[in-house]
Amino acid sequence: MKFLVPDDVELLMKNHKEWIELFPLAVSVGAGNDRPILVLQDKEKNFSLPVWLGSLDAAAAMVQASSTSPDSTPHRTTQNILKAFKSELKFCLFQEIVGHNQFVDLVLRLGTVVEEYLTVRCRADESMSICLLSQARFFSPIEIIKKSRDMESDLKHAPVLNAMSALKEPRTKELLN
């Protein structure tokens, strides 16, 4: 957790040419063992960032991405707490990839007399639905976009063990004997 002043956030956004603003494009829910993916894309459609989600965050993200505002969401209480403190989630900044996990800094504007920001490092797969609901702005350096595409390729070619078929196969053989 780190406190920033507004000038720090403005510097981050304006003085880093490698940062690209991204916008939610789609949520892809694959069949079988594929993890759901939120696709973020820049305005010019030159860059796309795949963000792997957990199943619960994917479901919440799909509800929040719909054109009608949901009556109830898993993050309504969190939003109410932020509002009570006159704070809001402003930015989601993709920072690093560790193994097969993407990490973001969530930047919250604090409702203090002097405008302050707080950054919190989180896993991206656990953060996207609250970011979408809060209408946070998404930013990523080009290098993270490229690493994410490499990570996507690694995940698609990784051997997958289907636990259900592994369990059923020996039992089926037992029943046939």
Image: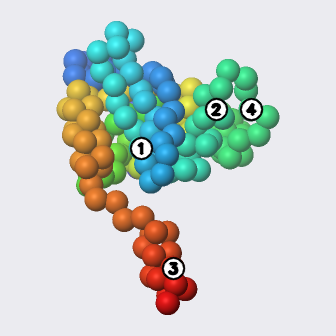
Q: Earlier in the sequence, mark 4 or mark 3?
A: 4
Q: Is residue 133 left or right of residue 41?
A: right
The kind of residue on which mark 2 rests is: Gln
- Residue placed furthest toward the front: 177
Viewer-nearest residue: 26 or 159: 159
Dot 2 or dot 3: first in sequence order is 2
Residue at 49%, 46% (x, y): give it. Answer: 31
Q: Nearer the viewer, mark 2 or mark 3?
A: 3
Which secondary structure lies at badge 4? loop
In 3D space, how far apart are the residues under numbered discs 1 and 2 (Cα atoms)? 17 Å
Residue at the disc numbered 3: 172
Circles 4 and 2: CB atoms closer than 8 Å: yes
Q: Nearer the viewer, residue 123 or 148?
A: 148
Residue bearing the label numbered 2: 64
Q: Secondary structure at mark 1?
A: strand
Circle 3 SS class: helix
The percent coordinates of residue 111 (x first, y second) are 59, 33
Q: Secondary structure at mark 2?
A: helix
> As shown in the figure, which amino acid type bears the numbered disc 1?
Trp
Q: Check residue 36 in the rendering and tell me which mark sits there, or answer none.
A: none
Badge 1 or badge 4: first in the primary sequence = 1
Say which amino acid is labelled 4: Pro
Question: Image quadrant of residue 142?
Answer: top left
Q: Which mark is residue 52?
A: 1
